[in-house]
Image (cartoon, rainbow, N blue to C red):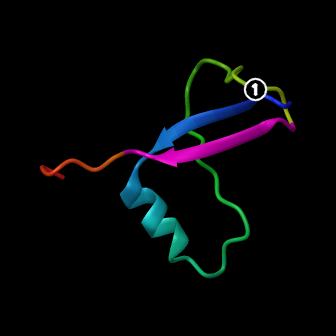
Amino acid sequence: MRDIYCAVTDPEWFTFLSKQSNLREVNFWKPSPKAFKAVEEGSLFAFKLRVRTHSQ
């Protein structure tokens, strides 16, 4: 079985990106002075949508 890194993302951002018909891939990278080391290059990386609350 392969390891998969799963990160939570914002539903509004996902909706915005899904409406862009010309995108083949998207980048969820956020600039940071630290290197991202959760997974090695080429590993599986999945996103789950953050649950909306009634206040959102």
Name the one closer to the observer, 17 or 7. 7
Task: Specify the quadrant of the image occupied by residue 22.
Answer: bottom right
Q: Position of residue 8 (x, y in %)?
A: 48, 39
**Residue 47 lies in magenta, yes or no?**
yes
Name the one closer to the observer, 16 or 44. 44
Region in magenta: 42-50
Q: Is residue 15 above or below residue 30?
A: below
Q: Position of residue 14 (x, y in %)?
A: 48, 60
Majority secondary structure of magenta residues: strand
Q: Residue furthest left?
A: 55
Task: Specify the quadrant of the image occupied by residue 2.
Answer: top right
**Residue 10 lies in magenta, yes or no?**
no
32 left or right of 55 in image: right
45 left or right of 41 in image: left
Q: Position of residue 15 (x, y in %)?
A: 44, 67
Task: Specify the quadrant of the image occupied by residue 13.
Answer: bottom left
Q: Residue at x 58, y 20 (%)?
A: 33
Q: Amino acid at mark 1?
A: Val
Q: Which residue is mark 1?
A: 39
Q: Residue at x 78, y 39 (%)?
A: 44
